[in-house]
Image (cartoon, rainbow, N blue to C red):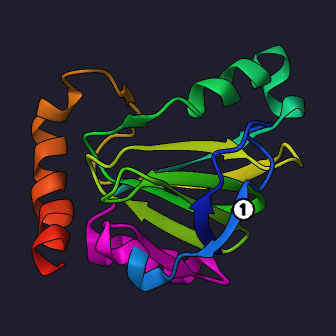
Amino acid sequence: MKAYFYDNLPGDQRLPHDSGKEVTVAELEKVGVLYFRFPDVEGVNTLAAERGYKNRDEIIVSPEKMGAIYETKVRQFFDEHLHEDEEIRYIRDGAGYFDVRNEGDEWIRIKLVKDDLIILPAGIYHRFTTDDTNYIQAMRLFKEEPKWTPLNRTEGLDENPYRQEYVTQFLKAQAEQA
């Protein structure tokens, strides 16, 4: 895992866009993002039991697996959005980027590779893309039945109760500590 501020320069979303300003695991935790590294699935199973993740599936995002819809889907995943559930991904193969917003509404880019696991809290604005290899295989974990409902960032979405809870728990708490 490597985390840093996104450079916001034009160019393919699948390129690193590394500003050179590193972000630590502790800084990720301040915005509610949890990171783990598990060399085998047993660690994932233990975490799943501890956090109440009852269901899982696997997804491969690649042109070979997805065919003609690949480019459309990757652009769709890159639209800024939030979920009303935690988003948990364990990378089984390949690599990709999760971008998350910090308390200053800046993008933090998190590169994940095989054996990395990330937990994004409900209500955090984020987006995803593969890297320039165009391949990632990930296990998705869920507390209940698998669902993946993105709510794209629009005016008024900040009033969503899951967004409000996220802001109160992480962003306001961070502002109060500053």
| Quadrant in which the N terminus is drawn | bottom right
Q: Measured from the top left, where is residue 91 in percent x and y?
A: 66, 63
| Quadrant in which the C terminus is drawn | bottom left
Q: Measured from the top left, where is residue 47 in percent x and y?
A: 39, 77
Q: Which residue is mark 1?
A: 18
Q: Nearer the viewer, residue 10 or 82?
A: 10
Q: Is residue 6 left or right of residue 173?
A: right
Q: Is residue 88 above or below residue 51?
A: above
Q: Measured from the top left, where is residue 171 in percent x and y?
A: 20, 61
The segment highlighted magenta reads 28-53
Q: Please give the name of the residue rendered at 49% of the width and 66% of the height, measured from the top-left corner.
A: 118
Q: Is residue 61 above or below residue 149?
A: below
Q: Quadrant of residue 119?
A: bottom left
Is residue 43 found inside the magenta-colored segment of the image?
yes
Q: Measured from the top left, where is residue 173 in percent x and y?
A: 12, 70
In this rendering, the count of numbered labels is: 1
Q: Please give the name of the residue rendered at 75% of the width and 50% of the height, measured from the top-left corner.
A: 136
Q: Please give the name of the residue rendered at 26% of the width and 46% of the height, measured from the top-left corner.
A: 123
Q: Nearer the viewer, residue 153 or 54?
A: 153
Q: Is residue 124 left or right of residue 112?
A: left
Q: Is residue 80 left or right of residue 149?
A: right
Q: Quadrant of residue 53?
A: bottom left
Residue farthest top in this picture: 68
Q: Please give the name of the residue rendered at 74% of the width and 36% of the height, measured from the top-left corner.
A: 10
* Mark 1 surroundings within 10 Å by alpha-carbon count, few (fewer than 14), some (14 through 19), many (20 or more): some
Q: Secondary structure at mark 1?
A: strand
Q: Is residue 144 above or below residue 10?
A: below
Q: Amino acid at mark 1?
A: Asp
